[in-house]
Image: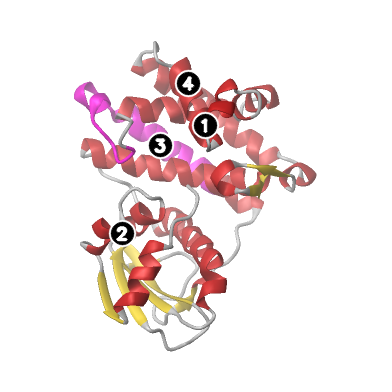
Amino acid sequence: MIPLTGMKAMAAQSATAIPRLTHAEAGLLSQTEYERVLALLESLEGDDWAQPTYCTEWTVRDMVAHLAGAVTGSTTFAEFWRQNVANPYLRQVDDPVDGINRLQLEERAARTTAELVAEFRRNGQIAVRNRRKLLWPVRKIHLPMGSLGFASVEYLMDTIYPRDQWMHRYDICAATGKQLVVTPEHDGRIVALVLLDIAKKLKGQLAQRSVALRLTGEIGGEFLLGRSTNPGCTVAMDLIDLNLRASGRISVEEALERTVISGDRATGLWFLSNMEVPY
């Protein structure tokens, strides 16, 4: 097993000590993820497009329509505004993300799969370039973003967009049987940032207890969440299962079937129940 990038290979590390993401690094992650998603989309054929995904209302084709729409939303400020602010569906839903997704899919309902891939290929590179060029004052603006609450443009562009693409890349691989390309430098870093978000979310609730998280799989490691150096329980799970649970794609009950909890089981269940973060 290869340790997550930036973390020591042996001793358990505090999840809050995971290095913060810089804007320059985010640009590199976004570029790599764009290239990997594009390579995957270009490999799809035939029945691949009709396969159901972990996003239960979406087929692979629907997911690619969303990916194409999302990158197009970062090509110009006018298009970002149209999708994310002036979108008429935003008034009809509790979570703005649902309204944005609806608009993206409806506008691409009549397009061929080749047209969807071409849109992602063309506009995905423009989106990466535009995000990398965002000025510091713009990145620090905080906006209401539904389930994200008030979040900075920087967090949305630098962390959530590459994470969303990464998770959908897995979704498509799982649906079609394609191999998920994973490297510690890229995928390990994206997952490490998920752990950092989980640690931030649970920090206040972990003042009197702690959890040791052991990630298994092709890349992984051991991490400590909470202040105590003597964790009340150890939760061992596959790196992919961590993301499936943290993104809400699988339930606590489904996660339990794939997870080994040692020590205080109640603490382990609490962790699995409260680890969801934005994707």
Name which residue type carries label 1: Val
Q: Which mark is residue 53?
A: none
Q: Secondary structure at mark 2?
A: helix
Mark 4 packing: few (<14 Cα in 10 Å), some, or many (20+)? some
- Magenta residues span 29-55
Name which residue type carries label 4: Glu
Q: In which image quadrant can residue 2 be found? A: bottom left
Mark 3 packing: few (<14 Cα in 10 Å), some, or many (20+)? many
Disc with the residue nearer the chain's start (3 vs 4): 3
Q: Residue at x 50, y 22 (%)?
A: 103
Name which residue type carries label 2: Val
Q: Secondary structure at mark 1?
A: loop
Q: Is residue 253 above or below residue 17?
A: above
Q: Which residue is mark 3?
A: 37
Q: In which image quadrant can residue 60 be found? A: top left
Q: Residue furthest right?
A: 137
Q: Residue at x 49, y 86 (%)?
A: 228
